[in-house]
Amino acid sequence: ESTEKPSQLKTRPQLQADVHRFSIQPLHRFKGPSASIKRPREVAHFSFDEDHKYVEDESGINYYVPPPMGVDLKEGFETFRHYEDKVDAHLDAMLKALVDKEKKSGKNSRVKADFVTWRGMMTKIMTTPFDNFAEFSMFATIHDGTIYIEEDFPSRAAERAAEASQPPPRHQHPDQQSREMMTYWGYKFETLALIPTPPSITPPAEIEQHQRSVVSNHAQHCSIVNTSFGPHSLILGGEVDGLLAPKSSDPDTPIQWAELKTAEELPPPARQQHRDILKFERKLLKFWAQSFLLGVPKIIVGFRSKAGILRALQTFNTHELPGMVRRGTGCWDGNVCINFATEFLGWLKEIVKEEGVWSIVLKKKSGVVEVRKIKEGTGDILSEDFLQWRMEAK
Ligand code: A3P
Ligand code: MG
Ligand code: MG
């Protein structure tokens, strides 16, 4: 038990780092037309191979092929090659891709921006206004005028471990699936819908062979884009699922990426209730934010039964989703998400001005993001290789 009086606590300097608070409510301050957004343009890319090793190329690119209906997405669960990050990957792969790119393109090719982060961090920030259970923990540092934001990996790993050690509920509905199974069928859907060569030049037997292959999430292709939210420029990296058409040689032509998602099928229109639509439209918020951030124009949803049978497909145009939801349940507003993120980034810029590692935390249900400096230096946010390259390139 502490014997210190509150007045004594106040004077302990190392614990008294300033805490900066950004309140999420009221949302009306973010209403109205959205801040101007620059269409994301790819500046670099990289892949992970079947061992989840970084490769500096397009080998991880896949092409969309319509998956067969009626397949049980639980098929092959026993042989799932599940990659789960056990070590903190920081921003390393993305920074490596930027360095590789700059080395190849020569001087003056430095990719500059106000912020560099994984797309996933921005998705969390953008969807915060309409997610009542939103929570996140990130670290940020500033280097040469750019703010780098990474996920607080140790916290997430601890959370995941705690979840995994929870016993399954005693009374389970027969259709209730384990967390691991629900993760599996998302990847199973991707395996059925993605092949490594354009379908037009792939023999049908080869397509089928790919669709039947062992499900693995080790290999990935990641796109790194340059975008902006109002006055703030960003470099975002994230996984892209597959192409609807081969990449054009013209860098100004939007890349025809498709994001693949699974969702539970809706009851037939006659039996649809408000809450069914609400559940689906809430899900669309994450689909939209995730795809919007990397400039992925299409989202292909595989609707499955409760038990995991693939029943139907629907393609959505990413840019049409906010309007669709506005005319529907109105459970989220894309402009508010964009304006919230723009304000938040501007606020961060005012705080993360001096060197050091800063924590950015939103605790569930707290309604406030708290930012505080936690240590000096750049932590492990920036890799040695990256720092060295930047020194050399100066
Ligand atoms: P679904 O999105 O169809 O559920 P992504 O959609 O981002 O390309 O991810 C592919 C699949 O990875 C997801 O398919 C899901 O199975 C799994 N996945 C992604 N994020 C996850 C998370 N936070 N928890 C559990 N599984 C996740
Ligand atoms: Mg993906
Ligand atoms: Mg996907």
Image (cartoon, grey):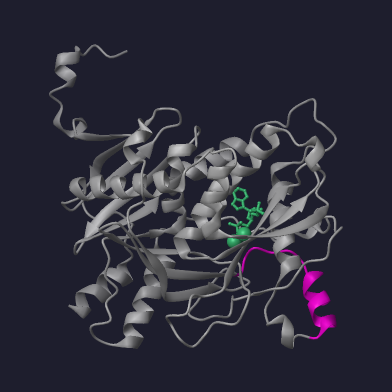
Please state the extent of the stretch shown in magenta in the rendering. Answer: 203-219
Task: Residue 39: give x, y in percent of width and height.
Answer: 40, 67
Would residue 236 be counted in the magenta stretch?
A: no
Q: Is residue 163 left or right of residue 319?
A: right
Quarter occupied by residue 16: top left
Q: What residue do we see at 68% from left, 33% from top?
A: 274
Q: Which image quarter has ligand 3?
A: bottom right
Q: What residue do we see at 38% from left, 30% from top?
A: 367
Regarding residue 145, the answer to whether it shows in the image is yes
The quadrant of the rendering that contains the C terminus is bottom left
Quick one: 167 or 216, which is closer to the camera? 216
Task: Residue 179: give x, y in percent of width and height.
Answer: 69, 43
Q: Is residue 249 left or right of residue 108?
A: right
Q: Is residue 321 left or right of residue 5?
A: right
Task: Residue 132: give x, y in percent of width and height.
Answer: 49, 32
Quarter occupied by residue 258: bottom right
